[in-house]
Image (tube, grey):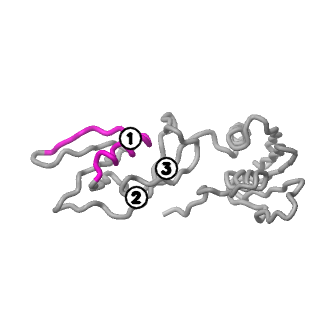
Amino acid sequence: MRTDLIVIYTDRLDACRTFYTGIGLDFAAERHGDGPEHYAAELDGCVFELYPSGERRPATGPLRLGLTAPAHDSVEDLTPGRHTLTDPDGRTVVLTVPGEPETTERGARAAVARLFGETARADITALAGGDLSITLASGGRTAVIEGRPESGWSWTLTPERPGSTAPGRTADTLDSAFADVHAAMTGRPGRTGGDEPRG
């Protein structure tokens, strides 16, 4: 079984079309017989339609959609990874923007540059068995992150900030480990939406 049609009824047709177009959907205006004008886009074999709501068809209520942008598409202003967005009607849209996986040397370097800037120094080593070791130096502090996707990630930071209450030093994903290290180094909150529940 596979999904081949998703229809959303909305009071904000133009705003929703603008939102979904902004995350990569390519809509065409359609009208079937005497029915209302609406918009349709194809998502890898599934038709995604936006219809105006009305008396016979009220606006679609709360919904959580998970979408992945095609690898060749760029989504304006969003870095590779998972992003939790809200459409104009308040529906949750979890959008995955593909990019170089952070669990490769090249992907880890891109993540370090994105999170810590060009002044951070990173030594990244791929170890036997698929483990990755990342030594990151920024602002007089050094962090070491080690692990792999299957077993999780651990990290250390030296020197510690006086009186700091650092996180548990483990993370399920490399993205979460980077967020925790960034928070510990800068004093800003970490894990800003990276590990949302699925479903």
Q: Residue 77 carries which label?
A: none
Sequence-first disc among 2 and 1: 1
Left or right of 193 in this view: 76: left
Q: How crowded is mark 3: few (under 14 residues within 10 Å), some or many (20 or more)?
A: many
Check the image and report above or below for 74 versus 199. above
Q: Considering the image in quadrants, where does the N terminus appear?
A: bottom left
The residues tagged by marks 3 and 1 sit, at their Cα atoms, a distance apart of 13 Å
Residue at 44%, 54% in the rendered image: 86
Residue under the image location 36 percent in, 56 percent down: 89
Q: Do the residues labelled 3 and 2 touch (CB within 8 Å)?
A: no
Which residue has dot 2 on it?
A: 91
SS for dot 2: loop
Q: In which quarter of the image is residue 9?
A: bottom left
Spatial CA span between label 2 and label 1: 15 Å
Residue pointed to by mark 3 = 95
> Where does residue 94 sit, x and y in percent of width and height?
49, 54
Q: What residue type is labelled 1?
A: Thr
In the displayed structure, does residue 9 sit left or right of residue 63?
A: left
Residue 194 in which image quadrant: bottom right
Q: What residue range appears in magenta? A: 12-32
Q: In this view, does 124 lie to the left or right of 48?
A: right
Residue drawn where x is 73% and y is 59% of the image: 151
Give neighbour class at mark 1: few <14, some 14-19, many 20+ (Cα, 10 Å): some
Q: Report how far apart the C-alphas of labels 3 and 2 lie in the structure.
A: 12 Å
Report x, y in % for residue 161. 85, 58
User: Amino acid under label 3?
Assistant: Leu
| Residue 21 image label | 1
Q: Do the residues labelled 2 and 1 touch (CB within 8 Å)?
A: no
Tell me which amino acid carries mark 2.
Answer: Arg
- Where does residue 108 sit, x and y in percent of width and height? 71, 42
